Amino acid sequence: MKEIDGGICAVRGVRAGGIKSGKMGLAVIIADGSAAGLFTRNKVIAAPNIITRERLQKCGHLGAIIANSGNANAFTGEKGLADAKEMAYLLSKETGVAEELIAVASTGVIGRKLEVGWIREHAGEVIRSLSSSPEGSNAAAHAIMTTDTVLKESAVELDSGVRIGGIAKGSGMIEPDMGTMLAFIYTDADLSADVLDSCLRIAVDKTFNMVVVDGDTSTNDMVLLTATASASIEPTIEEFQTGLNHVLTYLAKKIARDGEGATKLIEARVMGAGTDNDARLVAKTIVRSSLVKSAVFGKDPNWGRVVAAIGYSGAIVEQEKISLSFASGEDIVHLVGRGVILDPTSNATNALKNIMEKEEIVIMVDLGVGNKNATAWGCDLTYEYIRINAEYTT
Amino acid sequence: MKEIDGGICAVRGVRAGGIKSGKMGLAVIIADGSAAGLFTRNKVIAAPNIITRERLQKCGHLGAIIANSGNANAFTGEKGLADAKEMAYLLSKETGVAEELIAVASTGVIGRKLEVGWIREHAGEVIRSLSSSPEGSNAAAHAIMTTDTVLKESAVELDSGVRIGGIAKGSGMIEPDMGTMLAFIYTDADLSADVLDSCLRIAVDKTFNMVVVDGDTSTNDMVLLTATASASIEPTIEEFQTGLNHVLTYLAKKIARDGEGATKLIEARVMGAGTDNDARLVAKTIVRSSLVKSAVFGKDPNWGRVVAAIGYSGAIVEQEKISLSFASGEDIVHLVGRGVILDPTSNATNALKNIMEKEEIVIMVDLGVGNKNATAWGCDLTYEYIRINAEYTT
């Protein structure tokens, strides 16, 4: 497997385009094939998610995606459903793709009527710009950004020749639960909707579902995976799963590192848990903790907050069995070994301070009660996060 | 029932004192009587909590409390247990109160050896200063403060003549779970340890356990309730429960409003839930949401974030049944009625902006699926919260 350029347009059979104008954006992707999707588990679910989930359940096939940024079209009642359907209708009319094969996605402010007029005005322009070159993927990825500061796209070519590419957006209101933020993934492999669904669930659980920016689960999370079959290659499921995990891990880390206001990536690696769920709980609780996040921002070697987070995670832990290390790149400092503080002198604190200066902080925990592992990603909590979210609609 | 001055020293049979010097503080309270306590459910539980819980389970009786601030004596192993015992021993030696009737409490940095030398040096001074005047309560409440910016004490006199008084501390690492921050409550009623325990559980569940500052549950939460019987009055349990709820509600709101860096108090009142637990879940999820907290700080009328929080709370909700209003004092704006946005014009937004300017924001939610209610308290998320926690140990 090797990483390649081009995002979703690296995948044969995909054309994409998009525009971004102020807070509003519109992306279109045309690619036909069997498909699977995962959606937010927030009980307040946005109109486009309701429509897209229904269509995907019926057909297991997608022909196109139309997605807007700037307005979530969430908590908008019957009008919201009609507006989401109109987005699909606009695309169908211009391209001939059947309406029921078009997925609709939205991201932005909740509880405001969608600006359908703006979308109607700009749909033609986006459709005329559709391209299978890397610029197409780039434009679509750019169009769905909100408070994101970096573009999120990734692609790999497997040894069999199959390609997998994806774009994503996500920066705030991030604690995906079974669904994710917006992520559109494509492959030119020839795979059925059932296989795609199973692979997608496995990959999302290890990647997007292990990202926490602020602990708020969105109303609009959506990840879609379409297989165009254009490469006429049927990879082994194992090979495909490995490639899919790779692309989604890359995008998940990008989202964590680009968390609203973030200056650092935090990776929590937990091992020695009694169950998979306990490992996940502990890893996510560490990256969710406001106190851990603030300490990382302040480069404060206050590792006691990690121990407190482990303790209230809800997982089965015994304090006298916990081991804790911090690392970044080649540097590592072992702080606690089976409940005992290893070096209570300022040497350990100085080594830790040195690591806290880095841009990627890895927190390694061994719970010492089993053999299950999990990794979660998050970011620091900064003045800038508060500025962004204190001024969001004003 | 009427509110009275004097904190815990308003209660007959209580003497208290304390000193605070930089980050270190030491408080002593002498009061003999049947007693009950609740402790953090964090699985990493601090040494003083282990010792005090054991002693209270054995006797149901307390003679005194010794509490320090500046160091949590948490995750400190065998040495931590020995240090906690030495605190009780020092107090016993100077006052004659039996060691096994002395409760020990600590609050501060986790994972550092307790400065027993400092406590040994200052214990005599504190014990000589013990007083049954309001100054005694004040000094003890002051001594246990860490990042707290206001003193937290409260007292009431019931119609029967019984008095209940309490002091508390708490500002960060606040999402109490069954235990609480530090809170020491006294009454001069004549009540058994069993009655105290039952009343305390009920009161804490409605008050301290409904406060969220940052969602981090401490390793050191502890609330102790002692009945000195000095008033020789046995109130009805109903009357006592009402008074206890009143004192704890006052202290709980004080802790929320004094959340680290807070500029505003947020009160989430949820009604119409299917179960008590669902009502609590929704109320706490709203005040825990980083996005709701940031919006309140920024006076941003972004009510969609409240709806998103309701949706991911885990409670059973149906978006077309949710009603939402914001209020402060006499002002109120009804935003959503059974899933329908009531006034999509700028009138509602302007009325909401007006409320967001106030210091106490009440968020009222009717889930419309049942008849259970709950209220939770929190505070806004500010630049100052991050400054405090980015620089905590450095």
Image (tube, coloured by chain):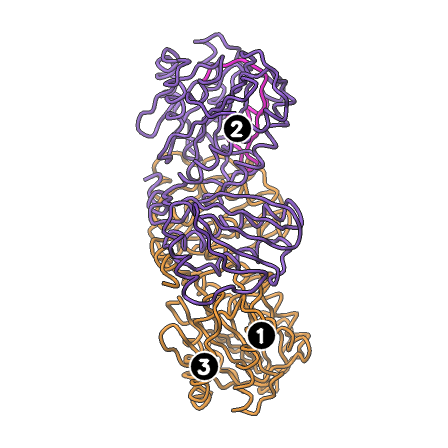
Chain colours: A orange, B purple
Q: Is residue A118 visible?
A: yes
The type of residue carrying mark 2 is Val
Residue receiving disc 1: A81
Residue at the top extreme?
A: B96
Q: Quadrant of residue A333?
A: top left
Q: Is residue B43 visible?
A: no
- Residue located 58% across and 74% down the image: A81
Q: Nearer the viewer, residue A347 or B198?
A: B198
The type of residue carrying mark 1 is Leu
Q: Quadrant of residue B196?
A: top right
Q: CA distance from mark 2 to mark 3?
A: 58 Å
The type of residue carrying mark 3 is Gly
- Residue located 58% across and 86% down the image: A231
Segment tinted magenta in the rendering: B29-55
Residue receiving disc 2: B223
- In the rendered image of this protein, does residue B126 appear above or below residue B261? above
Q: Nearer the viewer, residue A335 or B158?
A: B158
In the image, which disc is placed on residue B92? none
**Is residue B40 part of the magenta span, yes or no?**
yes
- In the rendered image of this protein, does residue B49 appear above or below residue A240? above
Q: CA distance from mark 2 to mark 1?
A: 50 Å
Residue A234: % across, % down: 64, 81
Chain of the residue where label 2 is placed in the rendered structure: B
Describe the element under mark 2 as helix, strand or loop.
strand
Q: Quadrant of residue A37?
A: bottom right
Q: How many discs mark residues in the rendered view? A: 3
Residue B274: % across, % down: 67, 50
- The answer to whether the residues at label 2 and label 3 have Cβ atoms under 8 Å apart is no
Q: CA distance from mark 1 to mark 3?
A: 15 Å
Residue receiving disc 3: A117
Q: Nearer the viewer, residue A176 or B271?
A: B271
